[in-house]
Amino acid sequence: MAARRWTLDGAREIIAEVRERTARAVAATEGLVTEREGLAAGSPTAVDLDERIQEEVSRWAREMEALGLDVKGVWLVDFDTGGGYYCWKWPEETLEYFHTYEEGFAGRTRIQ
């Protein structure tokens, strides 16, 4: 399957949806992480919660990929432009950064 190529306008049109879906996943995951705190590693409850956290993150990643985004990390997505990426990370309000293929997240610059 060919990668989707994004214009800035096209990416900004769906950023509200990306942010909304990510907010739901973050809230669900944070609740599970809170439950997990203080439990002994390897305990049945901890193992169950760890699996549920991973399932939530995986579900979010699949949703982002279905929208045509590249998932680069937890709550971090890129919009491939064909010459680099528009880059968004939770909890940013809007899509404001770009980086080249070579520079990656560390080389993000504000979109002019």
Image (cartoon, grey):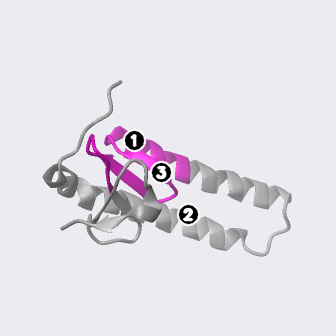
* Left or right, residue 44 beside residue 101: right
- Above or below 1: residue 78: below
Check residue 65 in the rendering and tell me which mark sits there, or answer none.
1
The Cα atoms of the two marked residues, 2 and 1, are separated by 19 Å
Find disc 2 in the rendering and name its residue. Answer: 29
User: Residue drawn at (16%, 49%), measured in percent from left and top?
Assistant: 10
Amino acid under disc 2: Thr
Find disc 3 in the rendering and name its residue. Answer: 72
Q: Is residue 28 magenta?
A: no
Q: Is residue 59 magenta?
A: yes
The Cα atoms of the two marked residues, 2 and 3, are separated by 18 Å
User: Where residue 41 appears, x then y in whole percent?
Assistant: 84, 63
- Above or below 61: residue 111: below
Q: Is residue 34 visible?
A: yes
Q: Is residue 60 visible?
A: no
- Tag 2's secondary structure? helix
Amino acid under disc 3: Lys
User: Where residue 110 appears, x then y in whole percent?
Assistant: 28, 69
Residue 49 lies in what quarter of the image?
bottom right
User: Residue drawn at (78%, 60%), measured in percent from left and top?
Assistant: 45
The Cα atoms of the two marked residues, 3 and 1, are separated by 11 Å
Q: Residues within 10 Å of mark 1 (few under 14, many from 20)?
A: few
Which of labels 2 and 1 is toward the front? 1
User: First in sequence: mark 3 or mark 1?
Assistant: 1
Check the picture and name the quadrant holding the N terminus. top left
Which of labels 3 and 1 is toward the front? 3
